[in-house]
Image (cartoon, rainbow, N blue to C red):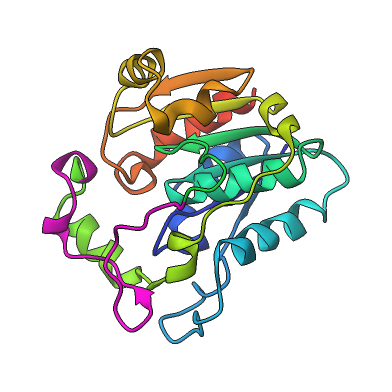
Amino acid sequence: MDIILIPGFWLDASSWNDVVPILEEQGHRTHPLTLPGLESVDADRSRIGLREHIDAVVRVVDGFDEPVVLVGHSGGGAIAHGVADRRPDRIARVVYVDAGPLADGLPINDGLPMVDGEIPLPPWHEFDEADLVDLDDGLRAAFRARAVPQPAGVALDPIVLRDERRYDVPITVIACEFPSSALHEWLAADAPFTRELAAVHDIDYVDLPTGHWPQFTKPVQLGQAIAAAVR
C-alpha cells in the first residue's frame, strides 16, 4: 500500500524518519511530505494557506493509479480530511495521529502567536503538559533545531468541505494525548469539535499513550499502529 505521511505544524518529511522503516518492513511504500513553505526557515510562506497545503497533497494522490492511505499528524489531520473531501474515491483510509477531522468553516488553530506573519514553534511552557509527555530534553532540542515556522494562513484559514462522500472514507484515530475513552465521552456529549468525527461511518480507535508527537517519543509503536490500521 502507498502511504502518504502528512506532518503537523513546524515539521517536514524528515519528522517521519523513525516511522518509515517500520512501515517499509511491512511491505508498504511510504511517501513522507514536506508541504509548501516548510522547505526551510528561509522559504517564502507569505502566500501559503490551508488550500495550498491541501492542493499539494491532492497532487500527490493524483499521481497514483490505486487508492492510497493518508496519515495526518496534528494539523496534518485537517489537511488529510480536506484531501478526502476532494478525492473521496481515491483514499482507502485516513489515519489521524493525535488528530481528527475538522468541520467545514473552522480553522486548524487560530490561537497560535504570529511573528512577522508566520508562526514559529512556541516556547515549551506555552504547551499543555499532556502535549509534552515523553518528550525529553534531547527530543525537545532536536525538535526545535528542525522546526520551521508554520505559514500563518494554514493555521488561520477556514477549511472548505463540499463532498459528503468524505464520510464514507474509513478512518483510524490513534489517540495519544487523550485516551480514546475521552473521545467517546465527548462524542456522547455532542461536543462541537467532535461533530465531524461523529458523521464518519467507519471509525477505528487505537490508544498509544504518549504526548502529542509520537513520531518522536514512540516511533516504533506508532509505525506498528499505522501498519495495523492499514491491514
Depth order, front residue of 102/144:
102
- The residue located at (69%, 28%) in the rendering is 169
The magenta segment is: 107-131
Q: Quadrant of residue 168?
A: top right
Q: Residue furthest right?
A: 65
Depth order, front residue of 88/160:
160
Depth order, front residue of 126/164:
164
Q: Is residue 119 above or below residue 72?
A: below
Residue 38: x, y in percent? 49, 72
Residue 51: x, y in percent? 62, 62
- The residue located at (57%, 30%) in the rendering is 227
Residue 120: x, y in percent? 31, 72
Is residue 119 part of the magenta span, yes or no?
yes
- The residue located at (56%, 24%) in the rendering is 228
Depth order, front residue of 69/117:
117
Is residue 22 part of the magenta span, yes or no?
no
